Amino acid sequence: MAKYNKVVLAYSGGLDTSIIIPWLKENYGCEVIAVAADVGQGKELSGLKEKAIKTGASKIYIEDLTDIFCDDYIVPTLKAGAVYEGKYLLGTAFARPIIAKRIVEIAKAEGADAIAHGCTGKGNDQVRFELAIKAFAPDMPIIAPWRIWDIKSRDEEIDYAEARNIPLNISRTTNYSKDMNIWHLSHEGLDLEDPANEPKYDEILELSVTPEKAPDVATYLTISFEKGAPVAINGEKMKTSDIIKYLNKVGGENGIGISDMVENRLVGMKSRGVYETPGGSILYFAHEQLESICLDRETMHYKQQIALKFADVVYFGQWYTPLREALSAFVDVTQQTVTGDVKLKLYKGNIVPASTTSPYSLYSEEIATFGEDDVYNQNDSAGFINLFGLPIKVKAMLNQKLENN
């Protein structure tokens, strides 16, 4: 192995990064500086400083990135309507680029020789972290212990930790792989690795209750948007992070945002996970509802195509690329008139639209009415159908001619 004097580690305090600190020191003889990013994971940050130092780090940075994460990463993705494979609201995917960028900044300031992370060789996060590192420090060496050490499983990780008296907040029976931030909580591993097993929701859910346990009375709320970004709840102006926190609480109480899916990882395999995204699910629903009255047909349909590509770009870790910037520029133009209020009813896992209003609404009751009107001449549709259907008619005429011959 190469020798490094100083390594900056992307640190969460979980099982992987807890044992990586002593592993780096044992194998490289280096100083280890831990960097933990606060992207809204809450209680997971408790005691992190003491734990990092106790396990061998020379120092730890705990960086509060929550508001930047919400405004510069979550909101652009929300405005794009990007959802990976129809279910995944990209909670882990768009958190990695901002974390990696800050780690690079600290590594440069500290004069580090390398950056290390705890991502496995099977996952997506190794790609997301390393593409972001390459974008800001193209020549920086990257150490990924999971790709080179002798440890083969999470059980062996626990063995390694116990042999070195490294404190862990998990056991072998509750050893789900989780990722938490202000947007979502993911659960993978153990019984979830077999799609035949129904998730043990009563044991794993932390942000939400199951729909069966949600209240028997509906909850109403109104979300206000300006140019595609959420700005208020029930008329009260809030910053984005507070809106998400509020909706997480209300949505979780009503059983909103629980998703069990098998997804196609970037590395080629399928993986199964359970995601809790209560606030995000509400925001996506409300934003789409508002767009339905604010965007013209051609823009909406083309934007739906863009959303699929945007989701792939985010999922694949390509945030810091010209393509993502170009897609965001397109999206921002479409959002200039996506301003208004969306009232929703939350009930036992369901989000139901109650009211949608906008000063830029393209919906015209005068034109759409089934009642009598003076603005739409129904006779005009005959000529439209004749022209629109002309290619079909010409093809049918040719078929008839060929059959008759």
Image (cartoon, rainbow, N blue to C red):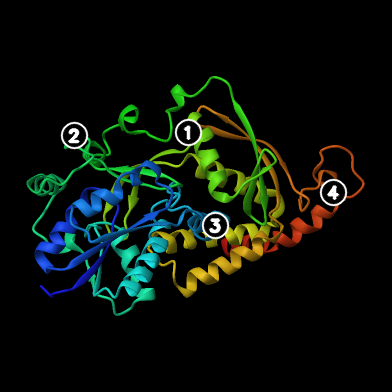
Q: Amino acid at mark 4?
A: Gln
Tell me the distance, in whole angstroms, between the alpha carbons under discs 3 and 4. 46 Å
Q: Position of residue 189 (x, y in %)?
A: 24, 42
Numbered disc 1: secondary structure: helix
Which residue lies under the disc numbered 1? 252
Q: Quadrant of residue 34?
A: bottom left
Q: Position of residue 104 (x, y in %)?
A: 35, 70
Report the residue at 38% width, 70% height from top: 105
Report the residue at 18% width, 43% height from top: 167
Q: What label does residue 173 carry, if any?
A: 2
Q: Nearer the viewer, residue 257 or 27?
A: 27
The C terminus is located in which quarter? bottom right
Task: Choose mark 4 or mark 1, whichever is in front.
Answer: 1
Counting residues from the N terminus, which is met first, the one under dot 2 or under dot 3?
3
Numbered disc 3: secondary structure: helix
Numbered disc 2: secondary structure: loop
Q: What label does residue 71 carry, if any?
A: 3
Q: Amino acid at mark 2?
A: Thr
Q: Nearer the viewer, residue 288 or 93?
A: 93
Q: What label does residue 378 carry, if any?
A: 4
Q: Position of residue 324 (x, y in %)?
A: 49, 68
Counting residues from the N terminus, which is met first, the one under dot 1 or under dot 2?
2
Tell me the distance, in whole angstroms, between the alpha carbons under discs 3 and 1. 22 Å
Q: Residues within 10 Å of mark 1 (few under 14, many from 20)?
A: many
Counting residues from the N terminus, which is met first, the one under dot 4 or under dot 1?
1
